[in-house]
């Protein structure tokens, strides 16, 4: 496997000059990849194997923002399982060498399927496309993997990756969101491949000497969080993983407190990775007062 030190990232916002990009021949994996779950990983690993055999660059094309913010739908997705920065880090670990981030706007949504293929796949010198069986593209999703080769006039090969399942349930970002909305964070690893994690910005860290407890106040920008409740979590530090208790309350929708037993201050870095292990208690709607006392009892 190729060790990637940094993923070359290219942002594409609207029509672009193909000659200006001068992209090298590549194998390209297509998808939104929110969460980069087990199905996505299979797709990227398949792409990586092809790229290694053909001695080509491994590229990924993803889109931002989520199409639901542009297309008419009742449910808009503006909180992500893996915001762009987190997605980049995962791609790097999977050996992706080049990342194309396409702005999904009204103009892009109106592209005819053949135009998308000619401009964004053939135009970027892609010689092999890899995508999931249910990948669609172009105006109203009229393009699919059955017609993509014809839309590209046979200029590239294709590999269609089949559905990945757990207990006959399709592995998907939608299913992971459903689990988070139900507080079932302990089931997420079956679909994601590991515990759901969020990278947060530490707003404050205080130490309660009497109770030997560190209180960490943290914000999670752009991440989807589990439903309101009290959770067992793990904080990743440079040395190890530390268990703590986090309560998500309607009273504090933006800043969340994590309580950790510790003999001394943790002196955490400005950003921290938090893994969500299990739900300890569900908060009734509107409840939030008194959760600090409950958390201390749980800890």
Image (cartoon, rainbow, N blue to C red):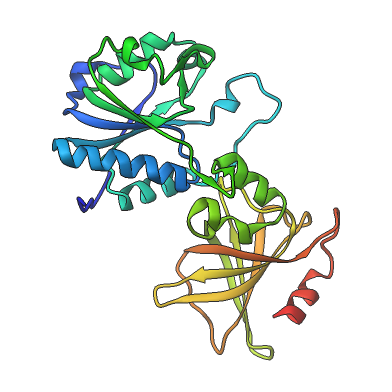
Q: Is residue 107 left or right of residue 278?
A: left
Picture coordinates of residue 121, whole percent (x, y): 30, 20
Q: How many callouts does the rendering have?
A: 0
**Of the pair 170 and 233, the residue shown nearer to us:** 170
Q: Quadrant of residue 70?
A: top right
Q: Quadrant of the C terminus?
A: bottom right
**Of the pair 197 and 173, the residue shown nearer to us:** 173
Q: Is residue 175 visible?
A: yes
Q: Kindly give the residue lying farthest to the front in the view shown.
A: 168
Q: Is residue 195 left or right of residue 23?
A: right
Q: Is residue 198 above or below residue 15?
A: below
Q: Residue at x 43, y 35 (%)?
A: 162
Picture coordinates of residue 143, whole percent (x, y): 45, 15
Picture coordinates of residue 24, whole percent (x, y): 16, 28
Q: Is residue 189 above or below residue 165?
A: below
**Of the pair 121 and 17, the residue shown nearer to us:** 121
Q: Is residue 36 visible?
A: no
Picture coordinates of residue 268, whole percent (x, y): 48, 72
Q: Residue at x 53, y 60 (%)?
A: 195
Q: Residue at x 31, y 41 (%)?
A: 46
């Amino acid at each position: 496997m190729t060790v990637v030190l940094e993923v070359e990232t290219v942002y594409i916002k609207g029509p672009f000059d193909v000659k200006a990009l001068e992209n090298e021949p590549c194998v390209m994996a297509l998808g939104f990849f929110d969460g980069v779950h087990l199905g996505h990983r299979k797709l990227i690993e398949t792409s990586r194997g092809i790229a290694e055999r053909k001695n080509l660059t491994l590229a990924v094309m993803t889109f931002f923002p989520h199409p639901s913010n542009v297309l008419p739908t009742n449910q808009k997705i503006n909180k992500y399982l893996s915001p762009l920065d987190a997605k980049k880090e995962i791609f790097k670990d999977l050996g992706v060498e080049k990342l194309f981030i396409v702005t999904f706007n009204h103009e892009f949504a109106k592209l005819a399927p053949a135009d998308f293929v000619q401009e964004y796949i053939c135009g970027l010198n892609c010689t092999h496309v890899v995508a999931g069986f249910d990948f669609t593209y172009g105006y109203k999703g009229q393009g699919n993997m059955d017609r993509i080769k014809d839309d590209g006039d046979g200029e590239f090969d294709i590999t269609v990756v089949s559905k990945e399942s757990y207990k006959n349930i399709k592995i998907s970002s939608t299913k992971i969101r459903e689990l988070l909305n139900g507080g079932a964070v302990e089931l997420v690893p079956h679909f994601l491949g590991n515990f759901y994690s969020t990278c947060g910005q530490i707003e404050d860290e205080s130490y309660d000497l009497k109770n030997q407890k560190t209180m960490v106040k943290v914000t999670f920008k752009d991440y989807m969080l589990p439903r309101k409740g009290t959770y067992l979590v793990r904080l990743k530090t440079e040395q190890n993983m530390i268990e703590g208790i986090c309560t998500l309350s309607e009273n504090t929708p933006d800043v969340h407190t994590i309580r950790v037993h510790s003999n001394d201050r943790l002196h955490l870095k400005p950003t921290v990775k938090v893994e969500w292990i299990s739900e300890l208690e569900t908060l009734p709607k509107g409840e939030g007062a008194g959760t600090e006392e409950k958390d201390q009892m749980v800890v």
